[in-house]
Amino acid sequence: MPPTKFTAVTIDSLAMLTPLPSDSEPTWLTIVRLLRWDKPAGRLILMIPALWAVILAAHGMPPLPLVGVIVLGSLATSAAGCVVNDLWDRDIDPQVSRTRTRPLASRALSVRTGLVVALVAFGCAWGLAAYLNRFSFWLCVAAIPFIVLYPLAKRVFPVPQLVLSLCWGFTVLISWSAVTAHLDLSTWLLWGATVLWALGFDTVYAMADREDDERIGVNSSARFFGSQAPLAIGLCFGGSTLLLGSVGFLLSLNGWFWLALATAAAGWFWQVRQLRDPQDGNLYGQLFRQNVWLGFVLLLGMELGSLGHTV
């Protein structure tokens, strides 16, 4: 791979960089891009499993203050994870077409600024976690190594998206235990469904970068599965459907949930068919965003499916 002006920069010199002046974008807006708040799909798709868990654990009637904490906590955690990812990948991102304009990759923000923003985001998440019970709080603490070390996984682990999926799984454990102060079989089934769903949609997302990742030598689930990626994604979505169905059976959810699950399953089946013969390079991003809507369909089904349930 030919060297680029980015790979020639040393780590020490990067640490001394200051934000590059911009005539078209104020610093605060660059920080918004660093936090990915300009791309809500990625923020919402982390929030959805957390809301699944709090709705199901509370049988459709979660305390509104807790819902607020979970929403804000997922936003803060997602923001922190994005900044940490960009700090680790500031020399890789410039070599990938989709990520080369990220603020740290383009040197629009300094490493020091990125570290400060990450600490503020983690601090906000920490403060919100203090609202939770002790068990949930320590689950939040246990999630931190996965968030911080995920970017390194792509350098040493053939399926780094699995590590990211485990981060998604923590949202279920934290939110469920915030309601019940314990975990049960339904929790773990929902956790498994979330991990498989996240592995599926993040592999879809990774397919957009497959050529760049191969050129650079970065691991991804899309590279690992290769031509069988659509099949692997289909198995992930199928497994998630079965596990969600098991949750619905255990919790005696009504027909609204099953209608939502059938809708999501049909959507996932259609996505896999599209992936077998992609005609447009924008397809992967479109399918990723569609998973946000499918997640909300399931959330609505879980809420309506819990109506009339007695503990």
Image (cartoon, rainbow, N blue to C red):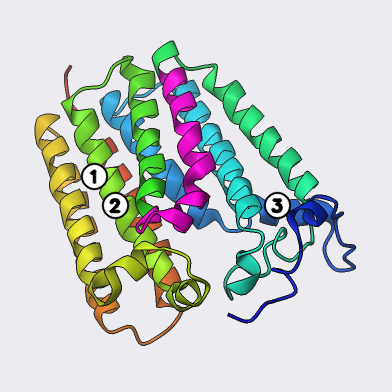
- Check the image and report above or below for 64 versus 172: above
- Which numbered marker is on residue 197? 2
Q: Report the residue at 76% width, 57% height from top.
A: 30
What secondary structure is found at the residue carrying circle 3?
Answer: helix
* Residue 133 percent location from the top left of the image: 44, 13
The structure residue drawn at horizontal position 27% and vertical position 30%, both measured from the top left corner, is 56
Quadrant, the N terminus: bottom right
Mark 2 residue crowding within 10 angstroms, few (<14) / some (14–19) / many (20+) = many
Amino acid type shown at disc 2: Trp
Tell me where residue 41 appears, x and y as whole percent. Answer: 49, 56
User: Where's residue 155, x and y in %?
Assistant: 48, 57
List the residue tagged with mark 1: 193
- Amino acid type, callout 1: Ala
| Residue stretch in magenta | 136-160
Q: Quadrant of residue 21?
A: bottom right
Residue identified by numbered label 3: 32
**Any magenta on residue 149?**
yes
Q: What is the spatial separation of the Cα atoms under label 1 and label 3, in whole angstroms?
A: 31 Å
Which residue is rendered at x = 65% and y = 70% of the image?
A: 94
The vertical placement of 70 against 102, above or below, is above
Identified by mark 3, the residue type is Val
- Between the C-alphas of marks 2 and 3, the distance is 27 Å
Asked if labels 3 and 2 touch by Cβ distance under 8 angstroms, the answer is: no
